[in-house]
Amino acid sequence: MSTDNTIPRHRADRYAVFGASGAQGSAIVAALTEAGHAVRGVSRSGAASPVPGVENVAADLGDRDQVRRALEGVSHVSLTIPLCYDPDLVRRYAENVTAAAAEQGVGRVVLNSNTRIPAEPTEAAAFETRRVAEEIVLGGPVPAVVLRPSLYLENLLAPGVVDGVTNAGVLAYPLPAVTPVSWVSHADLGRGIAVALAEEADDLVGQTLDIGGPDLVGADLAAAVAAAAGKPLRFEPLDPAIFEQGLAGFLGADAAAGVAGLYHWVGRDPETAVMSGGTDGLKKLGVTPTSAADWSARQHAWAPMA
């Protein structure tokens, strides 16, 4: 595969993207439309995708009949599980998609696990619910690929993070300063999924790929953002409990606990490598990772005043 971030163009099949109105889903839709594919955006509300030219339909992942109808005439499926950490619900979501995809003759499913997953079981629902989803998708009747991004660079655009950069000279994030992370952009995720869905990527079927950029610890990440912000920054670990409280205000307590559980787990093992090492996965997909420095330079949130 080439490594110029150009997604191969294919015949005009129809690609369904679950979660198309969300941040990751929008990036997946953008990559697929860039490659010339017809895209059906699927979300619970049927909200319009920010990407023009997309067919938008409503379907509740928990309702198999709705999922089946959403996949009528679809050849490929991208699945991102929403911010749900109830094991039974996540299992139902994954089972509904794999069953409906098989019934509708879908040729490939690519699951965005939305996280890395430790080799051994944990108490963190953020990991374990996605582990179950992976097992169901890879064990289902439709050829499948799983991508495991680490942490998204777009997380750094949260208001609290931006406020720290612009007003306090700190990059505050709920990770230990020594934890290596293979940060990845939404755009690189989208390009990776578009490639994994392609017919030319048959060699990827059945594989699980960790994806991301070069490993960075806290000081490295702060330096990348500092160059774009035009000011010195220091990395400041944020208490995951405080992070969770902030999330609860707009995600709700259950979703906030699910998301924050990942950070609580990492905080108990600061030198864990679970979030590191994603460049080989992107290379296998033919995607050149966007560096934290290049990504930061494109953001207006902390751009220095002229």
Image: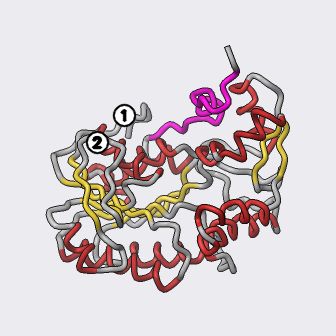
Amino acid beneath label 2? Thr
In magenta stretch: residue 234: no
Side (left or right) of 148 relative to 101: right
User: Residue 166's quadrant in the figure?
Assistant: top right
Quadrant for the C terminus in the image: top right
Q: CA distance from mark 2 to mark 1?
A: 12 Å
Residue assigned mark 1: 6
Quick check: can you spot residue 139?
no
The residue under label 2 is 33
Q: Position of residue 300 (x, y in %)?
A: 60, 29
Magenta span: 287-304
What's the magenta bit mostly, secondary-structure-wise? loop
* Outermost residue toward the bottom in this view: 88
Q: Nearer the viewer, mark 2 or mark 1?
A: 2
| Among the 4 quarters of the image, the one containing residue 240 | bottom right
User: Which label number is shown at residue 18?
Assistant: none
Q: Are marks 2 and 1 in contact (CB under 8 Å)?
A: no
